[in-house]
Each structure stands twice: as structure tokens, then as C-alpha cells.
């Protein structure tokens, strides 16, 4: 039986949940994810936990917020005027908007969550939606390629 090693190409299915049971991602065996260890978008601790697993093996992997998307940072909460939205958008708490930002000279779209509407101002949260959450991945290895 072949065991997963660093840089292997791996086909997996998994369900990612928050501590309260909310599913934040589901990758089914019918539509699996193919990753190369060391080059995927999965948290490094998930990749490390897969090393040594074999085809067909299932594992629960818990990721602390520090190993995942980091803590929620108060300085990523910004208050802007409601007038900024004009007639285009009627912001409501919980709404996720896409905003273009420039980082290191490169434009990128980031999700921004509307937290609160107060006194003709909108409080926006630029934290990643999973920041501050512990994550649990219930993962199954479908296939391993050297």
C-alpha cells in the first residue's frame, strides 16, 4: 500500500465544519479535489496531517484559527458612509460584497461582510469569513499519485 508523501498528487473528498456544526465547504467523492501537497489552498496543518495516510483512509483533522485563517482583527473593521453605495446596493447585515483592492500593486477581489448599519454609516468586515474559527475537516483519500 502506498502512503502519502510530500509533493504527491492526491485526490480527496472532505467536509469542512465550524465548531457549531456549520458546513463551510463540502467536496464530494463524485466531484473530488485534486491537490499537490505543498502547493494547495488547504491549510498547511491539513496537508501535514495527510502525510502517511493511504488510499481509502479517512481522518478528522482539527485546525486552530491560528493555523487556518488567523484571528479576527478589529482593525479590519471599517466604517464608511451609506451614501458610498448610492442606488446600486442596499446593504444589509450579513450581506457579503466583493470589493476590489490593490495590494502590492496588484488588483484583487476580496469578500467584505456587512456587519452593521448605524447612523447613515455601514460597518464592513474585511476579515476572511473563516478568520477566528477553529475548523474541522473530515477527509477521505480517494487516490494517490507519485
Image (spheres, grey):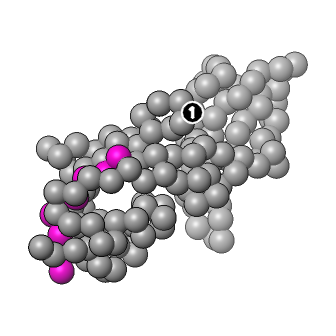
Residue behind mark 1: 96
Total numbered labels: 1
Q: Is residue 100 visible?
A: no
Q: Position of residue 91 (x, y in %)?
A: 65, 23
Is 78 placed left or right of 72 in the picture? right
Most foreground residue, 15 or 52:
52
Magenta segment, prevailing SS (helix, strand or loop): strand
Q: Which quarter of the picture shows residue 141?
A: bottom left
Q: Secondary structure at mark 1?
A: strand
Quadrant (top left/top right/bottom left/bottom right) for the C terminus = bottom left
At x 71%, y 28%, the residue is 115
Q: Position of residue 43 (x, y in %)?
A: 48, 61
Q: Which residues are magenta?
A: 138-146
Q: Which quarter of the picture shows residue 96?
A: top right
Most foreground residue, 90 or 117:
117
Q: Is residue 119 magenta?
A: no
- Looking at the picture, does residue 24 appear above or below residue 67? above
Amino acid at each position: 500500500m502506498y502512503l502519502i508523501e510530500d509533493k504527491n498528487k492526491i485526490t480527496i473528498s472532505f467536509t469542512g465544519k465550524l465548531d457549531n456544526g456549520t458546513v463551510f465547504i463540502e467536496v464530494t467523492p463524485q466531484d473530488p479535489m485534486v491537490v499537490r501537497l505543498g502547493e494547495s489552498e488547504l491549510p498547511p496543518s491539513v496537508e501535514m496531517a495527510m502525510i502517511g495516510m493511504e488510499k481509502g483512509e479517512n481522518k478528522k483533522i482539527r485546525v486552530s484559527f491560528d493555523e487556518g485563517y488567523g484571528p479576527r482583527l478589529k482593525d479590519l473593521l471599517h466604517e464608511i458612509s451609506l451614501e458610498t453605495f448610492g442606488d446600486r446596493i442596499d446593504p444589509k447585515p450579513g450581506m457579503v460584497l466583493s470589493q476590489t483592492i490593490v495590494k502590492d500593486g496588484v488588483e484583487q477581489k476580496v469578500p467584505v461582510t456587512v456587519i452593521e448599519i448605524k447612523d447613515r454609516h455601514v460597518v464592513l468586515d474585511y476579515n476572511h469569513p473563516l478568520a477566528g474559527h477553529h475548523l474541522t475537516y473530515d477527509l477521505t483519500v480517494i487516490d494517490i499519485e507519485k
